[in-house]
Each structure stands twice: as C-alpha cells, then as structure tokens.
Amino acid sequence: MFDLVIRGGTLIDGRRTPRYLADVGVRDGRVATIGRISTDASAREIDATGLIVAPGVVDLHTHYDSQIYWDPWCSISGWHGVTTVVVGNCGFGFAPVRPEARERAMLTMSRNEAVPIECMKAGMPWDWTTYPEFLDSLQRTPKGVNVSSYVALGPLLAWVTGSVDEAKGRLLSTGEKQEAERLLIEAMDAGACGWSAQLIGPDTIQRDFDGTPMMTDLLHEEDIRFFAQALGRVGRGAIQMIGVPKLANILASESGRPVIFNVLAARTDQHGAPAESHELLIRWLAKANARGQRIIAQSVTCAIDYQFTLEDWNLFDTSVLWRELTLGTVAERMEKMRDPARRTALIAEFEAGAAPLAGGGTEKLDVRLGVSLQDLLLAYVTVEDPELKKWEGHTVAEIAAATGAHPIDAFLDVSLACDLGAGWQTEPRELDTKAMHEIANCPYAVPGLSDGGAHTKFLTTGTYPTEFLATWVRDHGVMDLEDAHWRLSAYSAQAAGIADRGIIAEGMPADIVVYELDALGLEPSERVYDWPGGAWRLDRRARGWRWTLVNGEVTFEDGACTLATPGHLLRHGRH
C-alpha cells in the first residue's frame, strides 16, 4: 500500500528526461515507485490526468529567517510551487547573536530588507544564541517547506568584534579571524550550507537602520579572501554573494567552492531601451567556469514591479539626500520633506541628472534596473480629495506638467497630503524577449532571486516560478518544460549543495507539484494583514497550481493551504 498515488499525470522528473505518462506512488514521505499502479493500492489518490507532475521548486534566495516562525509555508513562495527555501542570504541573519545584541540584530533587517521590527520582536522566539542552536530552533519549528541555511557573515562579524558598529570598516585581528573560523566550522558541522555576504561597498543601496552601509559591504578584500579560504579549508558548502564579478572570481579562486552570484538580469539604458549588459555577464560566467571557477548566477526572470509609500520606502538610499530624508519617524520625515532648503537640494540633484532610481542607482547610470522618479505612477491616494484623486493613474511627470510644479515638489506634495500614505508604483514594463531567452538559457545561471520575506511592502517577486513557467516557457517558448524544471529544481539544488532535492525518482523525498499548464498564471497583488500585531504586507497568489506536496504531504490544494507542516530542516552534509 502507498500513502498517496498521483495517477495519470505527465511526469517531468527534473533531470531533463523527456516527459512521459506515469503514476507516482508515495510512501513514508518518499517516492516509492514510478509506473503503473493498481487502483486499490493507496489511501489517497490525486487524479493528475492532463496535468504536469514535476519536482517542487528550490528557492535559493530568500530572507524568511524571521518570517518562518509565524508563517510556516513561507508565503509568497509557498503559493507558487516552492517546496525548499534557503535562508541567511546576503550576509543578513540572526545567528550567532548574544542576548543583549538581539534588538540590534533585528534593526539591521528593518531597513535594508524592510522587515518590520515590531513583527520580528513579536514573532521570533529567540531561543538560541549560537548558530547550531539557531538550526536546532528551525528544526523544532513547524515548517510547511524544507529549509536550508547559510551562515550570514554579518552576525558572525558582530560576534567576533563585539558589536555591529565595531565590525564596520576595519580589518579583523588575528584573534578575531581565528574565532570567526571556529564559528564557521561549528556552523558548517551543524549543517549550514555555506556562507553569504553582501559585498557592494560603501555606496550600497541596502543599508543599516541608521543609513550606514551594512557590515559586509565594508569588508576589506583581505578579510573577504580569508573567509573564502576558511570555507576552502572546510571543504564543503557554497558562497552566496551580491557584488561585482571581480569579487566573485576572488571568492571562487580562494575557496575552491561554488559561488552563487547575484545578479544576472535584463537591464535597460537611460531611455528604457534594452541594454546588452547581460551579454557581458554571460561571457564572463563562461570564461570563469572554463578556468575552473564554479560561479553560478541567479537570474531575474520575473517583472520587478515596485509598489510603495514614502512611509516605508528605503530604496532611494543611493542618494545621500533621499537617504537622510527617509530616515526617522513618519512625523520627522514629513517635517524634512516640507523643508524648503532640502527641497532646493533635491531639485538641484534632479536637475543635475543624479536623482535616485526606484530600485537602486541614480540617473547617472548608463545601464539600470531601477525606474526614474518622474516615471513613478500614482496608484492611489488615501484622502477623499477630488483634486488629489484625479491624479490616480498618472505619473509624477504628468502630475508635475499639469500642475506647473517641479517633479520633486509634485511627488512630495502628493505624499504629504496623504501623510505619506499615497501609493506609488513603477509602471509595468515589458521585459525584452530576446534578452530573457539569453538569460534563461545561460548554462551558468538558474532562475530565481525571489527575495521572499524581504521588501514585503514593495515587492512580490516570490512569484517567479509561476511567471517563469507561464510567461516565459508556455507563452514565449524560451525553453521546454524539461529544461525549465531542471533549472527551477535540480540545478538550483545542485548549486547550493542540496543533495536530495530537486528531482522525482524512486527513493527521493516526495517534494512534488501538480499543475495545469494552460491555467497557470498570477492573481493581482493584494495587501494582507496577517503578520504579528496585524502588520500588513503585499501578497500575490497564483492559479493553476493544483497540489503541492512536501515530503509526501499535501501543503496546498487548488490554491488553499492545508495547514500541514511536513517540512524538514536540511542540514548540509547530513542527507
């Protein structure tokens, strides 16, 4: 007898094997057999006739480190076929952390990843101090997905130097390096899958709660090399980093370990036309791998649609002026936004062609992912004022032209009239099909970069599996389903060293999705109030996913969560 049989589906096993019709029998959380199974051989059956049966998605780039404690299914990801997530990305995390440093650790996540500190305070148990204790806590916690974790270098640096502020901008001493390596070995022995760091430098966009760079952004190259060499001495695990290709080359060479590089994306020039920067990165990846440097890029394969209010927004931080303007309480921000001297400086910056882009960088960039301030769209206002409401659906530039105001004044005045509650968004932009075809098919890249758990009032990029399969595979034909599921699951798992996930095969854990390809698509994003203390976030669900199984148990059925929590902590090297 089987616990469950998935009957009559089109099986795509994640290994690039050509699809075929088969039943899948599940017993004790694992795939017991694949083939024809008698009709009376299971306690439960799923009729997959006409549906695709594929491996669950492995989401390598998330920040669910705190959210998993109050949301076991790690939504948004859980709604979109994801069965395994990796936390601890970008050098941001919560272990090791001494009890007296917990609030400061939470503050580091409150601006750079826009996780509300009140939610972290209310939702995290903080029943750990060391990294092994943190993994033990994750193991005890009910989970609707499987979880693997990097050692985030930020908290490790704060531990060995004594504080977050002490860790910023100086070289580690010999004794601190010895302690850091001891902690790294301890974490790897406990099951960490490697280490992570944001290595953008002092001009980083993602900043600490006080507007200063993050600890890892200020790491000296000597210490970056040390941490790479330390992982090399461990001899297992991967490095996740965001930064420039030169540093990825150094990390791969010094460690001899795989490096997951962020990010490969389709960019535009200052006029919105497709740029060729992704082609340069693809050529760099090919050369690096040919030299024996195992560098795998994560690619952005979904539309980036920012939605925000100035009550929470922090992604103008590449501008010193805007960074200072958006620090502090709402009342303090509003006072600064009314200041004529600050307005004059902001207008001068704008006129000099140096205004910030929504999502990173400034207008001076020839190639960009971000969107110009004047192109932001007013989605809604929060006051019943006909003179304001008539501008809903118009851009900052259009509002400014119609009112005779400067774009800076128009943007700030509308926001202030709503006590910073006016909703702005980037206009939906068609991604260049040719560029996406090249990015999606890069031999050294995997789809993803969901950023799940972060920027939850701005972004819904955790939807990437649905968009990748529906928009790019089904509608645009950038690749076949066999290749798509290999990239979404098996290749992604391989990149992070997750040995027993990503394929459907006898003896493997039954992390499986069953979906209707023709029906697959995204629902509209919505504001939901389901975080600790009633805090809100943006959510975006999908249609077409019929069943999601984690370790053989159904966690989602026709878009509804079953409340089952069969997820495992995946301790690297212990599978």
Image: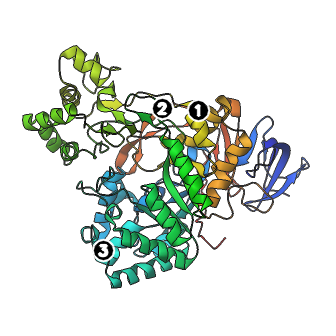
Q: Secondary structure at mark 1?
A: helix
Q: To which residue does mark 2 refer?
A: 274
- Quarter of the figure that contains the C terminus: bottom right
Dot 2 alpha-carbon crowd within 10 angstroms: few under 14, some 14 to 19, many 20 or more: some
Hey, what amino acid is under mark 1? Answer: Lys
Q: Earlier in the sequence, mark 3 or mark 1?
A: 3
552 vs 306, nearest the viewer: 306
Residue 171's mark?
3
At 36% from the left edge and 34% from the top edge, which residue is drawn?
371
Residue 91's mark?
none
- List x then y, in percent, for residue 200: 36, 56
At 29% from the left edge and 27% from the top edge, which residue is drawn?
374
At 35% from the left edge and 49% from the top edge, which residue is drawn?
114
Q: To which residue does mark 1 refer?
A: 434
Hey, what amino acid is under mark 3? Answer: Leu
Q: Are marks 2 and 1 in contact (CB under 8 Å)?
A: yes
Dot 3 alpha-carbon crowd within 10 angstroms: few under 14, some 14 to 19, many 20 or more: some
Q: Are marks 3 and 1 in contact (CB under 8 Å)?
A: no
- List x then y, in percent, for residue 94: 39, 66
Q: Secondary structure at mark 3?
A: loop
